[in-house]
Amino acid sequence: MPRNALLPVFFLLGISAMASWHALEPSEEAGRTAAIQLGQALFEDRTLSASGSMACASCHQREHAFAQNVAVPELYGERRGTRNVPSLLDLPYFESFFWDGRGTRLDLAVIAAFTNPAEMGSPDMDAVIHAISARKAYREQFRAAFGDERVDQERVSSVLMSYLASLTTAGNRYDAFVAGDTTSLSEAERRGMEVFMGKADCGSCHSATGKLAPFTDNRFHHSNVGLERMTGHVSETISAFKLRRESGSSMAELVLSDPEMAALGRFAVTSQGRDLAAYRTPTLRNISRTAPYMHDGSVATLEEAIRREIYYRSLARGAPISLTAQEQRDLRAFLQALDDAALPTH
């Protein structure tokens, strides 16, 4: 089964964080198809942003595994984001959403960008719903999907989730290997898998257990990336963040518009000292398609990411991890085997 073909199963069974929302399920196949098509149209519609220049698809680009090949997104005017765009093909493997895990409900996460001043910038969802309702073509699509033309937040969220659930892929060669096809990995890739599971200890955070391994532990770790932004003024940054929050600014707006506040990491969610500059472990699926890396996109290449991870994992363990040049090449080959055979075509 293609790995993202499991996404509708997650939706129906309510596994992990996805148990906290209820998607509207059109009863007929034609309704489900209409919901997917409507979700795609909304996903790609730039006119639903305040500037008229941004859509969900502006950052989550199909050709880059529904991520983006720049460090942080360029928004509109001279504005830039603060966080690297994660791939939407990764959704089935996560229990919370966004780099700091501030989202625990997918139905809210999929519409968050519409109203975030640091992203698409609509004043509220009522404005988005009004813009959709004002277009006859959209009203007709809602009728096809749900049987009537009513547009509301729940339905907008539902069709977007239907579209994301439809993004099936062809699986990868590691999944085939685990399923029993021992010829699916090359000799170098098998050596790299041994390094990954053993000497490099990558699997302690990027879990490779199960038939459809998530390659993440869904936990938050310190990567020593971006800390220099707050050097010498951590307390001031925290105080400014708390003051802005108390004044009514949303967490998402602050961390996506201010690089120093973005550097707070998971702390912005929990206010726990241990979470300062901690970020969710990304999955390694489609890793070679989603450069640059880290939460701020500051690591440009997979080779650099491997070297950095080996160095900081050695520091965390208190013992050096010494990989030969060949072992690093083999490890890279294995990581490339985690790429889906093909990306979604619709």
Image (cartoon, rainbow, N blue to C red):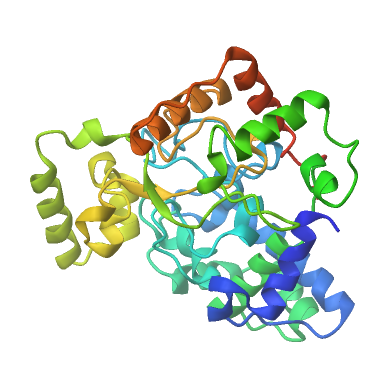
Residue 153 drawn at (x, y percent): 54, 77
Closer to the camera, 159 or 184?
184
In the picture shown, does residue 11 fall above or below 74? below
Q: Residue at x 38, y 48 (%)?
A: 221
Q: Is residue 262 left or right of residue 246?
A: right
- Residue 198: x percent and y percent? 60, 37
Residue 330 relative to residue 117: left or right? right
Quarter of the image for residue 213 reads bottom right
The quarter of the image holding the N terminus is: bottom right
Camera sees residue 278: yes
Residue in the image at 14% along x and 46% along y: 237
Residue ranking furthest to the top: 325
Q: Residue at x 14, y 52 (%)?
A: 238
List x then y, in percent, for residue 197: 62, 40
Which residue corresponds to the image point at 48% horizontal and 63% vertical from the top-left?
96
Closer-to-camera residue (131/225): 225
Spot occupied by residue 212 in the image (x, y as percentages of width and height): 73, 56
